[in-house]
Amino acid sequence: MSEIHLSPTEAAAKLGITTKALKLYERHGLVSPLRAANGYRAYGPAEMARLHQVLALKRLGLPLAKIAGLLRSSLASLDTILALQEDLLGREADRLSHALSLVRAARARLAAGDRLSVDDLANLTTETTMTKPKPDDLKATMDRIIDRHFTAEDRAELAKITFDQDAVTQAWTALIAEAKALMTQNDTTSSVALDLARRWQAQIGAFTLNKPDIETKLKAVWADALVDPEAAPTLPINAELMAFMVRVTANLKPVKTA
């Protein structure tokens, strides 16, 4: 065989993971290593490509069970995952390029004998060292927008809902990653897309208590947030992804009531 095949130890070293992780991915059905005549596992190009997909999706915060489902669906294409990575890395590259330009400009000013003011240094710090917004800052921005649409009575009623914030955050992270992957395929009608739409709607319903008036106000909040210069850059989704999910959910058949 002309193709190179790696042992578990070699494959793990190449990918920067452990052999224990390889065994875990195999148990979840995420990768099926080849077997030599002596029973030893081996990883060739196809298996390494699949591991790339697994690790890329895992980096987005998806649990292994959800990754397994995605890789069994129409999203199993390596190109689909690479397109998703390209989008995310492109956004990060833009952020880093902007940060680099600010650092170079600051150095040029120092070389010219200028001094950086407190405001200059504060801006330089926030733009070049903070990779994500402070939770308190994001909350303050969103609260300002929410106040435009929700009355004090609305907020008092919603405050009665109890939930595990970490679990909710993890659930939305996974849903958003799935939506981004589907968007690269422009898939709005497959069973995978419709299943995502149902779970997306269920997450929204848990917050809105499935009340149409509350849901309408929530949509208005997001519409404002997506164009707000302070809020938009900090949000986990953008207007394009939101529009995509609107198209997907529009394909859900309404639930018939007796």
Image (cartoon, grey):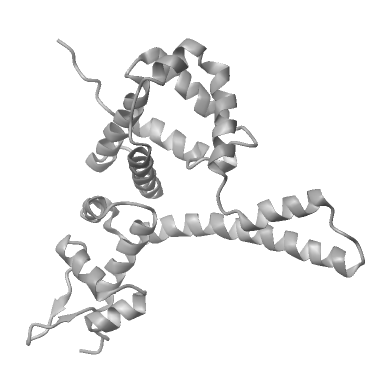
Q: Nearer the viewer, residue 258 or 204?
A: 204
| In this view, 206 is above or below 102 | above
Q: Quadrant of the N terminus?
A: bottom left
Seen at 55% across and 57% down, the residue is 92
Asked if residue 226 can be seen in this view, the reply is: no
Q: Nearer the viewer, residue 118 or 243?
A: 118
Relative to residue 26, is residue 56 drawn left or right? right
| In this view, 57 is above or below 112 | above
Q: Farthest residue toward the right?
A: 113
- Report x, y in % for residue 28: 17, 60
- Report x, y in % for residue 66: 25, 50
- Report x, y in % for residue 50: 27, 67
| In this view, 67 is above or below 231 | below
Residue 101 occupies quadrant: bottom right
Relative to residue 85, is residue 123 drawn left or right? right
- Report x, y in % for residue 160: 37, 20
